[in-house]
Amino acid sequence: MISHLKGTLTSKSPTEIVVDVNGVGYTVSITVSTFEKLPVTGKEIVVLTHFHVREDAQQLFGFLTEAEREMFRLLISVSGIGPKIAQAILSGATAEALRDMIALGNINSLTSLPGVGRKTAERLVVELRDKVMKLEPETTTAGAPAATGIRTEVLLALTSLGYNRAIAEKAIRTALQEFNGKEPTLEELLKQAIKTAGR
């Protein structure tokens, strides 16, 4: 079992990275949420991993937070959800946002995620509701800021206002750039995200 990789980030895309560990390049599948937290190529990173073995393939999945890796493992424990679907789900929502959706039994939000139909969403709530509440908050391993509770609250606020989740996520990312690295309050971020979404 490969638990983590520590090395140089040599290439990255929204679904895959290559990490050079002492001259050996490891290809690692990642989520979009992880991609957004990656440093520039050439930097040293620590990637938490899940090593998935099938008869016809061996694949490494990588995460920058323990919360995301634990959520990934919870997802693949559910019947009908394989690692590729779990990767897609976590590319559509952060581990923190997904935890809230499951804990609140928010079927509509869950069915808006890639690969999740109504039956799968209901199964996620039934099987994982108690388990997700035990997850630790996200803390990053690569020196980049972790997703904050404020971001999740703003996302939930925007979706409750009727914004499409993908548009809301994009609006939040764009809004955060307006603060030039400063930590906005919940109210500041929500106002800026609504302004951005309306552009």
Image (tube, grey):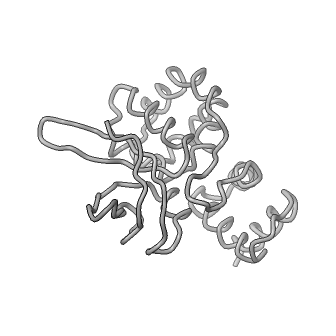
Looking at the picture, how far across and down is residue 131, in whole percent? Answer: 57, 23
Q: Quadrant of the N terminus?
A: top left
> Camera-side residue: 169 or 106?
169
Residue under the image location 77 percent in, 52 percent down: 150
Q: Is residue 152 left or right of residue 13?
A: right
- Total marks shown come to 0
Q: Quadrant of residue 147?
A: bottom right
Residue under the image location 60 percent in, 55 percent down: 165
Residue under the image location 54 percent in, 64 percent down: 36
Residue under the image location 63 percent in, 45 percent down: 138
> Camera-side residue: 84 or 135?
135
> Camera-side residue: 94 or 195?
94
Looking at the picture, how far across and down is residue 16, in whole percent? Answer: 35, 61
Q: Quadrant of the C terminus?
A: bottom right
Looking at the picture, how far across and down is residue 42, in whole percent? Answer: 44, 75
| 131 is higher (above) or lower (below) than 55 | above
Looking at the picture, how far across and down is residue 168, in whole percent? Answer: 65, 61
Q: Is residue 189 left or right of residue 159?
A: right
| 50 is higher (above) or lower (below) than 189 | above
Q: Quadrant of residue 103?
A: top right
Name the residue furthest front.
22
